[in-house]
Amino acid sequence: MAGRLLIAALVAGQTLLAGPSRGHADPLPPHAPRIADYDIAVRLDAQTKRLDGRLRLAWRNPSADTVPDLWFHLYLNAFRDRETTFWRESRGQLRDVPMAEDGWGKIDVTALRIAGGADLLPSLTFEAPDDGNRRDRTLARVRLPQPVAPGGTLDLEIAFTALLPKAYARTGYAGDYFLVGQWFPKIAVYEPAGTRGRAAGGWNAHQFHANSEFYADFGHYRAAITLPRRFVVGATGVRTARVDNGDGTTTHTYEQGDVHDFAWTASPHFVEITRRFEAAKEVSAQAYREAAARLGRSADAQRLGDVEVRLLMQPEHMPQAERYLRTAMRGIAAFGLAYGRYPYRTLTIVDPPEAAIGTGGMEYPTFFTAGTTTPFNAWPLDRVYLPEIVVAHEFAHQYFQGMLASNEAEEAWLDEGITEWATGRLLDDLLGADRSFLELAGLRVGDLDYQRAGNDRSRGLEMIRQPSWTYDRGYTFNSYGRPSLTLRTLEGLLGRDTMARVMRTYAERWRFRHPSSDDFYRVASEVAGRDLTPFFRQTIESPAVIDYAVGGITREATYTSVTVRREGDLQIPIVVAFKFAGRPVERRTWDGVARWTRFTFDRAEPLEWVDVDPERRVALDVSWLNNGRVIAADRRAPVAMTSRWLLAVQQVVSWLAF
Ligand SMILES: [Zn+2]
């Protein structure tokens, strides 16, 4: 609600920012450091599903160390055979999509040399630092004849061949549809001392696991993709050339700076829809002013840029094209205002065919895959907002993982969890908080209900900050839903405006860098003006659960006492509301530390109801069914109603989502 207070804050903000620093009011860094620049030429044989590629890689040593070796990801080798770490962990199945019997894929490096110099291929070894699996070939290391000096650069010439897997896990083909991700030898991240808390510099590189995703350095990518003329192509970045080679093939060249990965897609069946996000039309002056006031930024710092949105749709999903586009447009505006402008000129959205649904829901810089099926074209599933959720989620990744390039293997919550929270926030605003997941036959489910449906006491075995490959069963909950609920709980503690400033400060300070969980804690504490580390240690780095509940109630003629219990291990300040007959609602606070506390009231009026955390700010509380109790019959009592409704919603959502 943009009321008088907001306008007053706006005026105050303008006054503050009108000082001499105004020319430097934009805290967003314009560009990423250039660590790894790629110039790639690749040819796709659409019949045999093979890639033949050559690339030139310019790598800069970003540290003060002398670097004696180079590490590369060869992630297509995850699909090589039944001996890979990926296969052992996934058993050939990811996100419920099984691998086809004949769906193997691989990548072979056929040449690797210093430009105009030494052949490095003989020194290439496969490494398995995570699990010691000697048969895994997803991580390679080469020794250099001469180490790379601090700040020095190295030019490499690399050739490779690859066989794409049948699509079931992020990348591959189905018929003549191709989604080509993790397809070239990609250099790992050399972390200088101080990066993500490390004491000494060194390579950070992991094998390809079933759960974990990616981590790479920023640079400039140029890729020339040659394939049969009949294909429609989409890729990271801007298309800078399209040349008909006169032999039945076309070469499409795409380029993009300030990114850390490059993916592309091809299919003759795509229906291409382009729409321009025109900031001047999509964002009102009032929206700029409100965001600037809320965040304490100048209106200038809020300015968004235009974006060419390109949607590559399956013909059978065309009735959903508008749902995709509308969500993307709202995402560019809302996330731009909240986390800083989307800095790229293009955004490509790929709608995969249903035979390749395993390639759906994947994020790459300026490029992502969504995912849907034909039943969502029409009633009743047009009111189940999964297509919107997927588009919003993958677009949020343009920030949390794309620009804030956290380590997805070691701290997945920083990309998946923050993305999940940001997605819920966007869809609550877009569709309504009570129906941002679905509205069907009078039943409404919001993002919060959806996230909470997976939250129960038995999930308290593993924790949020934990390497992705070390989970038993808790990866999804701890990387997505639980961090989303944690951030909602934090928002409940800090208030919505402070939370917005926390997220904005984090997004602008760590844009084009590699943040860790500790960096997030530091920003949150700084902006909130108090040390939030104890909160994060309990919620992010411990398996403890939160559960506060009404305990015993004792009533005598002249007094009433109510016990409130802490049934989980996690401690958080709690508000308890009491309603006595003929009196207004009374609120008391409790630090939530002891196992229980007792509230006593010396009065004759009967207690009508009691409610722990009445606004349901503590989204992480594993059960809200024990938070409230109605004592005296009162038709207006909110507690019992809420409980019954929540029970129904939790049941339905658990059928749908888990
Ligand atoms: Zn994600």
Image (cartoon, grey):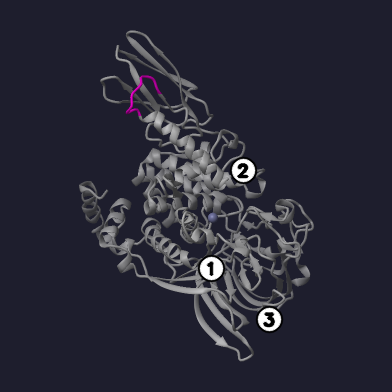
Q: How far from the left and from the top, in percent, is residue 88?
A: 74, 52
Compare marks 1 and 2 and give the one earlier in the sequence: 1
Range of the magenta residues? Answer: 630-637
Say whether residue 634 is magenta: yes
Q: Nearer the viewer, mark 2 or mark 3?
A: 2
Identify which amino acid the numbered label 3 is placed on: Gly
The answer to whether the residue labelled 1 contacts the one labelled 2, judged by CB atoms less than 8 Å apart, is no
Who is closer to the viewer here, 646 or 85? 646
Q: Residue tagged by mark 1?
A: 316
Identify which amino acid the numbered label 2 is placed on: Gly
Compare marks 1 and 3 and give the one earlier in the sequence: 3
Identified at 34% across, 21% down, the residue is 608
Identified at 51% across, 43% down, the residue is 653
Between the residue at mark 2 and the residue at mark 3, the CA separation in whole angstroms equals 49 Å
Q: Nearer the viewer, mark 1 or mark 3?
A: 1
Identified at 36% across, 23% down, the residue is 609
Q: Residue tagged by mark 2?
A: 474
In the figure, 18 relative to 173: above or below?
Answer: above
Which quadrant of the structure image shows residue 38? bottom right
Q: Is residue 162 left or right of residue 623?
A: right
Q: Is residue 650 left or right of residue 430?
A: right
Who is closer to the viewer here, 164 or 336? 164
